[in-house]
Amino acid sequence: MRSRSNLNKFAEQNINIYILFMILFLTGLSIGAAIVNVVSIESCNLIVKPLKNVTGDITSDKAVDIIIKTFISSMKPVIFMWIAGFTNFSVYCIIICLVYKGGLLGFIIGVIFRIYGLESGLAISLSSILPQYLIYIPILFLMAGYSYKYTFDRKKSIGARNMIRYFLKLLMCSLGCILVAVTDAYITSFLIKTFVNGG
């Protein structure tokens, strides 16, 4: 309960910076969606091919493989921003990371809409992307906020307590990424099989 209160307090005190993070992410989203227009249909079909291959039940081995791959992929930008907190140019790293992740998401959504059309594309995007990104985007924003704050706190005081707290925040985001990976392996895979491949 106390940790939740601290999290809410942290968010309230840094609301302006989180609005900026959202603008950066949405900017990347728009850029990614626009890039789709210069990509060939053949390339778009290759990109959505993995969605069409999600058939049958998710075996334990397959689920573990998805969890590992998704977790590693999710953790890369989180660790990147966490390490950036120890430097004096964390702001630039955060900008690059959020615009890149937003661009990647926008590109994938754009490809889906281009291949499947508006109605089917919306259903597929909601089933294949929304579940894990509802969890993952707040994690990205939180880590960006922690990194940004730690950069300036570090200049005031470099103490073991601050470093431990910063490390614990990485662990918290890591747990969130595990949840993202599990969601991708079970919930998203089930929804893709149901809505994309007709169950």
Image: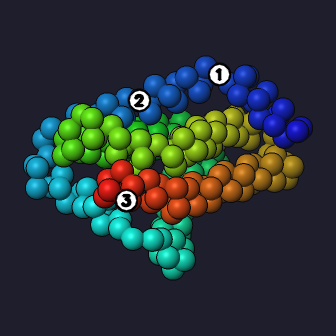
Q: Which of the colour schemes (rainbow, by chain, secondary structure, one colour) is used?
A: rainbow
Q: Is residue 169 above or below residue 5?
A: below
Residue at horizontal 55 percent and vertical 46 percent from the top: 136
Camera-side residue of 73 and 149: 73
The reply to whether residue 170 is in sight is no
Foreground of the two, 149 or 16: 16
Which residue bears the numbered disc 3?
A: 199
Give percent across and percent down for residue 5: 84, 32
Residue drawn at (26%, 45%), measured in percent from left and top? 112
Location of the N terminus (image quadrant)? top right
Q: Name the residue under label 2.
A: 26
Seen at 45% across and 60% down, the residue is 189
Q: Which amino acid does label 3 sit on?
A: Gly
Q: Residue furthest bottom?
A: 61
Q: Between disc 2 and disc 3, whose residue precedes?
A: 2
- Give the class, few, some or many, for how many residues have Cα within 10 Å of label 1's Cα (few <14, many ≥20): few
Q: The C terminus lies in which quarter of the figure?
A: bottom left
Q: Nearer the viewer, residue 104 or 108?
A: 108
Label 2 SS: helix
Does 127 appear above or below 2? below
Q: Position of residue 94 (x, y in %)?
A: 51, 40
**Residue located beneath label 1 in the image:** 15
Q: Closer to the N terminus: mark 1 or mark 2? A: 1
Q: How far apart are marks 2 and 3 (CA)?
A: 33 Å
Q: How far apart are marks 3 and 1 (CA)?
A: 42 Å
User: Is residue 124 rendered to the left or right of residue 163?
Assistant: left
Nearest to N terminus: mark 3 or mark 1: 1
Q: Which amino acid does label 1 sit on?
A: Ile
Nearer to us in this view, 67 or 148: 67
